[in-house]
Image (cartoon, rainbow, N blue to C red):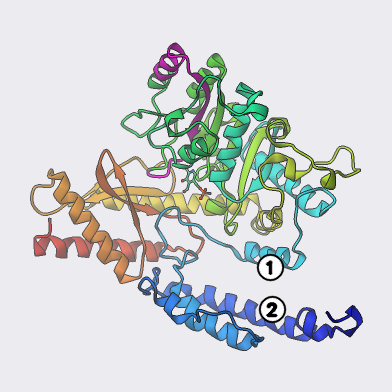
Amino acid sequence: LPRVNDLDASATGDVPAAEAREAFRRAAELAADYLEGVGDRPVLSRNRPGDLLAALPAEPPSGEERFEAIFADFERLIEPALTHWNHPGFFAYFAISGSAAGIAAETLAAAANVNAMLWRTSPAATELEERTCDWLRQMMDLPAAFRGHINDTASISTLLALAAARHRALPESRERGLAGGPAPVVYASVHAHASVDKAAMTLGLGLGGVRHVPADGSFRLDPSALRELVRQDRAAGRLPIAVVATAGTTSTTSVDPLRRVAELCQAEGLWLHVDAAYAGSAAICPEYRTLLDGLELADSIVVNPHKWLFVPVDCSVLYTRGYAPLRDAFSLVPAYLETEEPEVLSLMDLGVQLGRRFRALKLWMVIRRFGVEGLRRRIRAHCALAAELKAAIEREPGFALAAPVPFSVVCFRALPAEDPNDDAATDRFNQELLRRLNAGGRGFLSHTELSGKVVLRWAIGNLRTTRERVFEVWDQARSIAATLRAEGVR
Ligand SMILES: Cc1ncc(COP(=O)(O)O)c(C=O)c1O
């Protein structure tokens, strides 16, 4: 082995400072060029499966390469294989955006590269997370008792919330697991996100530990059906522990009757977790906050600023009533992580992972750059655009709205020329319409299934989306539907 003094810093350290500066400058330019021109690209990559894999060397480079060559390959190979989520025509799933403030913050967070596990491993990460989560709490008009922290995704936030619920109902499970005790059950509507089922699988409840509660005609959980399922489970000796209500379901953005569900949870001693991953952002506007009446009664709430608050992926805030429910479920401090600071928050106590990224920086910079009013204005603009699109769909012969539009997602079906009551034929018609529309490259929509029928989903939520783009793609949808009818597709 060489002795340390023999090591050449230029061969063992990072690249020279001047080269690093040039690389950052080039990356910033590439990012700016990308964002300015992204709307001219097809939203979906034109790659076929395996194209990129085949273009990438199977072996890693044994010697060093120049940034110039690496950036060139980014443009040549990686960019064409991107699906452009930051695109004005991205209307699939939940349309999201990385804003300039968030992108700049991610750059700085990467430079600092802190691991926010303990207060002392970066006071900035811990305290900025406390402060920005409290800003968002105020913006969402939630009681001061709620304390937030940031996870990567809503799936993890929901997992942690249900772990806290499990701990409250069965504290002994922390030591001995679930064996030998009553079977715990959680409840969520048939329209709840699959992350609830995955959490149950992970927490040892199993998929059989989730009851999917029927919903009403507007896709909202039916509280009477919930009450009856809880009664049946208790009668069968099972242990109801929690209800997950959704504020903004994935398919239609419907909002479960939060107040009624909360009252039922209080009467039954059940933990109420509200999945507001999408619509929680809209709660910063007083007029949409009223649609989420009862949110303040929850035991835990998840909201994803990476969905609709223009923070780059990933940023999911989980609120609980104080940090104690999460600490009780998760805190486990080995000797090598003990610290001397008394009363500080250790983010590692709040979940499964020890290390975590410095995500608060991007939330902080986005809230500051836009201001609360600026964020509200953008959310309102998206909802107004969705309302206009909904009206256009309602007016259009041969199209039918498939669900109410409480926020910025419009669900609809196109109808074939003949026998629009033939559901299977209408499903095929919509699938073909979607395929051709998405192949066009100007807009990207996704689909869902409602009452067993294929429904097209138009999600507005990207910062770069314009009214012109929405109606350009709508005109395309109308003309593709007309072509399909003329071709007799059904
Ligand atoms: C209502 C709802 N909850 C949870 C999730 C999961 O989000 P994540 O990707 O952050 O885990 C989604 C994803 O779209 C969602 O729509």
- Residue 107 numbered mark, or none: 1
Look at the picture and state if 260 lies above or below 35: above
Q: Residue furthest front?
A: 1
Under tag 1, what secondary structure? helix
Q: CA distance from mark 2 to mark 1?
A: 9 Å
Relative height, residue 379 to residue 275 (above, below): below
Label 2 sits on residue:
24
Left-right relation of 110 to 169: right
| Crowd around label 1: few <14 · some 14–19 · many ≥20 (10 Å) | some
Quarter of the figure with the N terminus:
bottom right
Q: Residue at x 30, y 70 (%)?
A: 440
Q: Which residues are magenta?
A: 228-251
Label 1 lies in ligand 1 vicinity (Cβ under 8 Å): no
| Residue 207 x, y percent position in the rendering | 43, 34
Quadrant of the rendering where the C terminus is positioned? bottom left
Is 243 inside the magenta-drawn segment? yes
Q: Amino acid at mark 1?
A: Thr
283 left or right, relative to 477: right
